[in-house]
Image (cartoon, coloured by chain):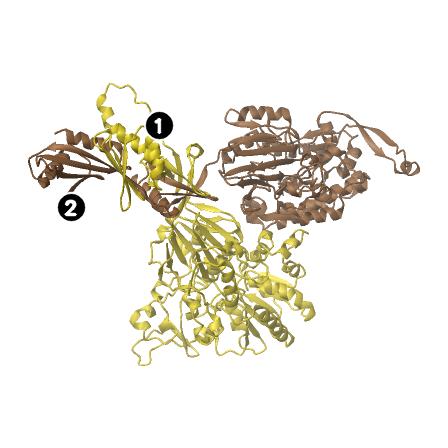
Amino acid sequence: MPEIKVTPLGAGQDVGRSCILVSIGGKNIMLDCGMHMGYNDDRRFPDFSYITQNGRLTDFLDCVIISHFHLDHCGALPYMSEMVGYDGPIYMTHPTKAICPILLEDFRKITVDKKGETNFFTSQMIKDCMKKVIPLNLHQTVQVDDELEIKAYYAGHVLGAAMVHIKVGSESVVYTGDYNMTPDRHLGAAWIDKCRPDILISESTYATTIRDSKRCRERDFLKKVHETIERGGKVLIPVFALGRAQELCILLETFWERMNLKAPIYFSTGLTEKANHYYKLFITWTNQKIRKTFVQRNMFEFKHIKAFDRSYADNPGPMVVFATPGMLHAGQSLQIFKKWAGNEKNMVIMPGYCVQGTIGHKILNGQRKLEMEGRATSVTLCCPLAPIKLQIVLDVKLQVEYMSFSAHADAKGIMQLIRMAEPRNMVLVHGEAVKMEFLKGKIEQEFNCYMPANGETITVTTNPSVPVDISLNLLKREMALGGPLPDPKKPRTMHGTLIMKENSLKLVSSEQALKELGLNEHQLRFTCRVQLQDPHSDPDTLHRIYTHLKSVLKGYTIQHLPDGTVMVESIVIKVSSSAEDTNTKVLLLSWSYQVKYFQCSYLTDGLYRD
Amino acid sequence: MKLYCLSGHPTLPCNVLKFKSTTIMLDCGLDTTSVLNFLPLPLVHSPRLSKLPGWVSKDGTVNLEKELKECAGRVFVDSQPEFCLPERELLDLSTIDVILISNYHCMMALPYITEHTGFTGTVYATEPTLQIGRLLMEELVNFMERVPKAQSATCWKNKEIQRMLPGPLKDAVDVWTWKRCYSMQEVNSALSKVQLVGYSQKVELFGAVQISPLSSGYSLGSSNWIIQSHHEKVSYVSGSSLLTTHPQPMDQSSLKNSDVLILTGLTQMPTANPDGMLGEFCSNLAMTIRAGGNVLVPCYSSGVIYDLLECLYQFIESASLGTTPFYFISPVANSSLEFSQIFAEWLCHNKQTKVYLPEPPFPHAELIQTNKLKHYPSIHGDFSSEFRQPCVVFTGHPSLRFGDVVHFMELWGKSSLNTIIFTEPDFSYLDALAPYQPLAMKCVYCPIDTRLNFHQVSKLLKEVQPVHVVCPEQYTQPPLTQSHRSDLMLELQPPPMPYRRCSVLNLPFRRRYERVYILPELANSLVPSEIKPGISVATVSAVLHSKDNKHTLQSVPKPPPAPPTKKRKRVMEEPPVVLAPKPLLSGAVPLEAFLATLQKHGITEVKVEETADGHILHLQAEDTLIQLEEDGTHIVCDNNEPLRTTLRDLVLRFLQKL
């Protein structure tokens, strides 16, 4: 029995460093290749030694597919392809291909230039890695090789996010990446057709949440921002440069416009303008409304939102700042946070999920005293062997708010996707174990659901049907038997011969099979003599038999042939007189092996019913 | 399989393919050359056009001076221009299941087909094709509706009268079927039936056939189509290009192994090299500007214009045209320029790389930013106040019969300083200019047609090796004007099947196999036996299920045990259980081995008699004869059923069952 195997190297009962191995129909596919935001050591990348202990991965993988540009889905890609070694194809959508190298470079800079780590991938490695990328278009069927085909679907999570359908023969797997089932202000909703995969591998970040309406969340968000501004406070919104940032910018921009507000809105890092440019050029990936109106008004040209400068953080008066990165684990958002944390008038709004270990995660869990690591450069310079780490304790006084704006499907959304795709089995990844359990319980009422941990393999046995080429003559003959309209309640039995030659399977009628194989038919016939007493002449006897059979055997084809035989279906009857006694007639009944038995018995019944 | 040909225009095709119970229309081209028979529609009152004399036949018997006007010896219809539609009588258009569009030029007749005909199917097109096609239709409607003409000329269409008219009106065909332009409402309704597809996307039609668009390299989103089932493959090639311009390169390899290849949309200018034409375009443009004249470029609002602008972008500085204003005037100019920048997926590799930076893929963004290129919806409004001469104007329609171009012809036609440069290959430039004669303006003809030429297509066909090729009859002979150029036609072995308007072709195609799926339970129950080395056979008896043109084979369900029922009558009505028929036999029964087997089963008294074809075995104790021959065995045995069964089974041991 064919099997499909799924092994998460990352994102198994966890969020972060998504990397899932799928083995299907003899092909090995890596789905995503991400990093973990919560770790700074080896654990930040998936453990590729699981695939092979010695060296390069090229021989062990048929392809790598990246679902979207978030670093927890692509952050380990240059490490995997350039440092571990992989030269095969890497697939991602056009927007992902465009944006992913920028985020990787950002990640590299923070790690190497700011944190001073060595043994990390270089800018050149990112470039070399991106050369191996083959862009994917939505709904395009890409033939990776003769047997393996992949198809991307819109996932809605961020610009260019895709779900993939992986197919070998009649077996298939769908991997969702991160997805969103409700359209938002700038993206559409995820969609997939009824592809009935053997396994659906789905993220489950919000497996237990059923979120209230988006409108309420937006109103809440705007209210909080507005209140803070009114009382002269500053609002920090840590975001990733691409994704939720644009969504919230559109939201604030329209609110500012409507309320005629004057407080400045800033967007940190020079990436903003560039980022918005990507949205403009990839407008076909945004939602219907934006696409329709882009010629008249491009939604990504903001009037109220300006570029941020480091010095603005100390400006008096209210302001709203979008700063990167989104989980307060490094960079500008963390710097601003440190500056503003002491004032209770200020507010930080976390608009998305925070991975364990990040400051974002800590403050969301109510931690009010944070131990910060500081690096005193002057000290380390004097004493390079023993770098002194300064421990600073930060008092968090500002208000901390959490508003789930991350574009992940909630429990309802996940069930919605299941209805769309109709999978036979389900694998949950990219979520916390406790939450997964809950959803798993729900799904298992309908079919199998798995939630493997990292390094754990689950195996699903598939039962594919066998494709065969049937001769059109045979098919049409059989179809005709069922009448002009097929009646599902009346099964039509068909008979034929299956010829198996090399890799081809052909189903033909038995006669055609003989012909195609160049075989002679071997006729097996039986003859049986029956004696009768009848005074008539031979032809008369035959005719009497004919009329008799005709009256007894209703519904059979009975023919009186000119050559002196009577045929009942394909059974031949001849009459001859015995040499000694002309009144004794000998009936010769002759039939072939293929004649159905009951026909024979009917005939003899008919003859003896005299 | 049949092909119905509804258009005679080789580059604006409209064919219908009937294949495996589906009816598929391939393209929906609108032949607009008919508008050349009409007077231009001026945007502002033109004294010259209104003073043209009416036409009266020489003997004075036919007076059509209200409908027909004479200009420089040619006769034009004074009415709203009309188009020559695809044939609508050859088959019932309401039976069409799907329409496949290959590029935005080949969909202009869509509203005539999908509206008011009972059409209920789906139209498939790529996103750029839909968006730009919509712009071109919008522009056409706008051109027509902006200058409504009260008069609709119909008398001249009368057969008797048409016969007496001078050429080319006299020779125009099917004039009574010519139609005015559709409305925007009809366009919207027609386009609402479009379903978007991406290159290499596989779309199932009713489970019977699969269609898939392939990049054709001609324009943004342009595609060729593969129409295939599991065993047959038809390729539809329409408007393809191998030149490196802005669109994604042509996908050639997927066309391989076609049973039939329908070939349309080859270059209309087989002797004009597009690169050479581009050079001539630039040099003539520069020359005119330097001499203080204006340049008029009649063109479509999308397509080659992007390449022209890109070429000019590189050329402007070197030719010191930095201060010359370039104007692009069309109701859809802005949309066309904007749309061209957002289709990264559909562009050539170079342009895609620019988007990754991120920069706009086409340099006309920079021309607009630096104010070198300005675009206006029409000559009215802002344009009239900002207009500076000498300048270069890109505007439509290339037929010179409607659109803003008519105004510039009237404005600039009288000065020999000005130049009109024709770049679109769809219209003969002499015919286009006819109603403006006499003309002082210089005329330059640089038709740029990037579609496949005969040399490229024969190389392509050699590579992809289709079994049969179908093409418009125009491609099977050299052009009329160059009858000695045998290189300007398709020469193939076997020769291509030509079609013309209203042809119905029977495509030489025999379907022999169909795909059926054996469910796992049945597959496991099959018992294969090896007949020859490497070849096994198994007899299959199964229940055939056919749903949505998909066939599956399932095990024959075991008849449920008859429920103990009191109503005996009911049971009698049940049809007799159909047993599997006995298989055909093959092979031969070897005498010695058979005798040995008989012996083992206690049949010892056997007399063997040799005959011409084999042997006769006489089982004396049983009074039974067995006739053994190469291709048959005959058992003659009187009323002894058990013996007959035994013998049968013994014989069967030596034979193969099929």
The amino acid marked with disc number 2 is Asp
- Which of the 4 quarters of the picture holds residue B550? top left
**Residue position marked by numbered label 2 in the rendering:** A563
From what the image shows, is residue B582 above or below residue B218? above
Give the chain ID for the yellow colour: B
- Asked if labels 1 and 2 touch by Cβ distance under 8 angstroms, the answer is no
Outermost right residue:
A382
Residue B561 or A396: which is nearer the viewer? B561
Q: Which mark is residue B558?
A: 1
From the viewer's perspective, is B648 left or right of A326? left
Q: Residue B657: x and y, percent?
A: 36, 38
Q: Position of residue B53 (x, y in %)?
A: 40, 77
A415 horizontally vs A229: left or right: left
Distance of label 2 from label 1 (alpha carbons):
43 Å
Chain of the residue under label 1 = B
Q: Is residue B46 visible?
A: no
Q: Nearer the viewer, residue A322 or A411?
A: A411
Which label lies toward us, 2 or 1?
2
- Residue at point 22% right, 32% down? B623
SS for dot 2: loop
Q: Which mark is residue A421?
A: none
The chain that appears brown in the image is A
Asked if badge 2 and badge 1 are on a common chain, one would say: no
- Report how many numbered discs are placed on residues in the image: 2
- For this rendering, which residue is in front, B556 or B122? B556
- Label 2 CA crowd tier, 10 Å (few <14, some 14–19, many 20+): few
| SS at circle 1 | loop
In the rendered structure, which amino acid carries the disc numbered 1? Lys
